Image (cartoon, rainbow, N blue to C red):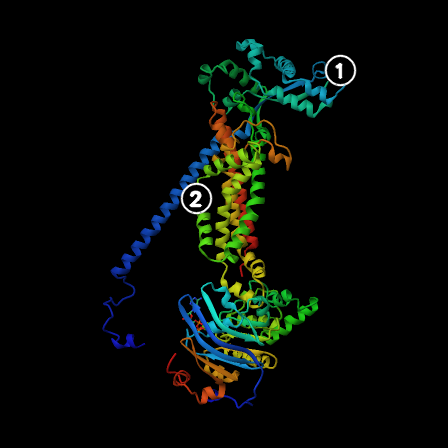
Amino acid sequence: MTDATAQGPDASRPERSGSLIALDERTRRRNRSERRFRLYGLIAIGIGVLALVVLLTSILSQGLPAFQQTFVNASVYLDPAKLDKNGTRDIEEIKKVSTFGYAPLIADAMDRKMESLGIDPEEFGLSDKDALEMISKEAAAQLRRYVIANPDQIGQTVEFRFLANGRIDGYYKGRVTMESAERDSNVSPAQLRLADELKADGALGTYFNWDFITAADASENRPEAAGIGVAIIGSFYMMLVVLFLALPIGVAASIYLEEFAPKNWFTDLIEVNISNLAAVPSIVFGILGLAIFINYVGLPQSAPIVGGLVLTLMTLPTIIISTRASLKSVPPSIRDAALGVGASKMQSVFHHVLPLAMPGILTGTIIGLAQALGETAPLMLIGMVAFVREYPGAPPEGFFDPASALPVQVYNWTTRADPAFVERASGAIIVLLLFLLCMNMIAIILRRRFERRW
Amino acid sequence: MNDMRPLERAVETKEIKFECRDCQVYYGDTHAIKDVNVDIEDKTVTAFIGPSGCGKSTFLRCLNRMNDTIDIARVEGSFLLDGENIYDKRVDPVQLRAKVGMVFQKPNPFPKSIYDNIAYGPRIHGLAKNKAELDEIVEKSLRRGAIWNEVKDRLDAPGTGLSGGQQQRLCIARAVATEPEVLLMDEPCSALDPIATAQVEELIDELRESYSVVIVTHSMQQAARVSQKTAFFHLGNLVEFGETGQIFTNPKDPRTESYITGRIG
Ligand SMILES: Nc1ncnc2c1ncn2[C@@H]1O[C@H](COP(=O)(O)OP(=O)(O)OP(=O)(O)O)[C@@H](O)[C@H]1O
Ligand SMILES: [Mg+2]
């Protein structure tokens, strides 16, 4: 009071121009700098959005073709003489016929298809064997799986879509051209011309490729058959392990540290260590997992359980840090209120603090899970790069079966020679991104549900 | 200045509820409460007055061990509630706080419905056997908190959606719902309008019938109106403690006199 009045009102008042309508120099300068700052912000956002758009278009343009696949339509006679010599239709007997037994059926089917269309491979300068090479080597396995699943079809003639060779598929996706086929030992221009002819007659077409999502990985020279089914299951199993281990452990640890633990040098030490753990490179967790879970405990290599345990270790600090932050952000007055009416510490935490912290905890957990889902390096160390053709079994045994993981599968495919695998890898990235998007949506929905706007 | 003159009250000696001896509170190195001795009587309203920062809230919080939640706070001395030291190792502060309820300086309703705000305490203490009893407790408490008429149609509405003054009365209702023996109120009326203040004061007067009430207030008029005993704190010391009438009309200490006449504070 006294200080302000002592000097008198006029002594310290700065000179100002009289009018409010004409801006003075100071105000103009302030406005200019504000406009400049807004511009910087817009530029920053623009750069970010641009980078995102470029990234997405590149991935989408490379990866979307993976969801389409070229097939050859032909009707195949499932000859009982070859598939089931005894005529018992015993599934074990049928399983004994290897893919070699199916190859003649396919050759036969192709012959008849060409004949019915009036196409002679000779006209294209191709032998029957050359023409047959247009069908994927995987086709026999494809047919075998079909017969084993439907043994009652033996003896019938069925319409079947055979996978076309990866080069033929690449031709229709722009990866292979007539010029490149000249130099390619795996495909000749004549085969491409025959494929065009078959396509014109409707015997060859491009269809949505469910197998990409459900099938297992395929070998180096059959990119057309490679799928991410095993990788998806492996990733899913690992996420289950992480969710069921990291969430309870992380939340319990955070609640204890934040609400119950005495504040002393020991808890400070733990706190510092948790923060440090969050910054440890993920590959270190991989080495740890290899040393402890595989070498010491003796868990199997490439198993989702090991991957899940490693990822749990990696995710725990993230969950603990975000949970503690959201517990901290609950106003202390709420705790006081609960204690004031005679609630115990535990009641105040579980009845009042935890529900308020829930949105933050869930967001942190899902961000942790998303991180874990995209993690590659530690999984490679525990052997998840291995080529896995078999689907892991149902849980809980399935957790111990070898499996792959989405990001590792992506890495794996990008190291292969055939460019068709790049397309597959990009396709797998799209699926991975879709999963991440879903998880973030779930995080947002859960946050909305739990958030009390009051 | 009329209301500064306390009502003539029959001065009677009552049972002592809280007997506090040589109380010291430290926040780290800060000595916030120094050598305080005070006897708080049962069925009496005791007012704590004093300039801001003198330690009124700190001392009040000692009485239900809310200072336990502040890590750096250290409490010494003996606080006897009905002859038992509440800082005894065997005392569970949770049980103590069910006996000694508290209304805080800032209204702090739970982010739950009005109904749940009131029902929470009775629920965790098992005061109601069924829903009907709980409803009854809620209504009775809201009535005693002088807020029933305003909220009776929206018991499911969030307690945090009320105005500041309504929130404070909700908190008072919440505190009385658990039927404490002692009610500690830290400036319960600082956010209330005169009408609500009058209602709360009426409530305090009514509570005196059965409880011991300790109220911190910055309003001398309020202290004079509602309390029978007044304690004047200054810089962590209990300067003067006595009958409200005597403190306001005939203070013994010059500091008390300066404060109540508005010269320090
Ligand atoms: N949590 C705390 N940590 C450290 N010091 C504190 C804490 N709470 C209070 N103090 C200190 O203790 C002293 C007494 O504070 P207290 O809150 O009891 O004052 P008060 O009399 O209630 O004041 P007001 O009337 O403004 O509410 C003050 O000097 C304050 O700085
Ligand atoms: Mg205070």
Task: Mark 2: give few (<14), some (14-19) or many (20+) Cα within 10 Å.
Answer: few
Query: Image check: A376 left or right of B99?
Result: left
Depth check: give the residue in front, B108 or B143: B108
Residue A415: give x, y in percent of width and height. 46, 26
Tag shown at residue A243? none
Q: Disc 1 vs disc 2: Cβ atoms closer than 8 Å?
A: no
Quarter of the image where one finds residue A51: top left
Relative height, residue B94 to residue A72 (above, below): below
Q: Is residue A405 visible?
A: no
Residue A144: give x, y in percent of width and height. 65, 21
Confirm or reject: label 1 Cβ below 8 Å from ligand 1.
no
Amino acid on which disc 2 is placed? Ala
Residue A209: give x, y in percent of width and height. 58, 29
Relative height, residue A136 to residue A288 (above, below): above
**Chain of the residue displaying label 1:** A
Residue A198: give x, y in percent of width and height. 57, 18
**Label 2's element?**
helix
Q: Is residue A264 visible?
A: yes
**Label 1's element?**
loop
Task: Mark 1: give few (<14), some (14-19) or many (20+) Cα within 10 Å.
Answer: few
Image quadrant holding the N terminus of chain A, namely: bottom left
Q: Residue at x 50, y 32 (%)?
A: A408
* Same chain assignment for discs 1 and 2: yes
Which residue is tagged 1?
A86
Tag shown at residue A279? 2
Depth check: give the residue in front, A97 or A53: A97
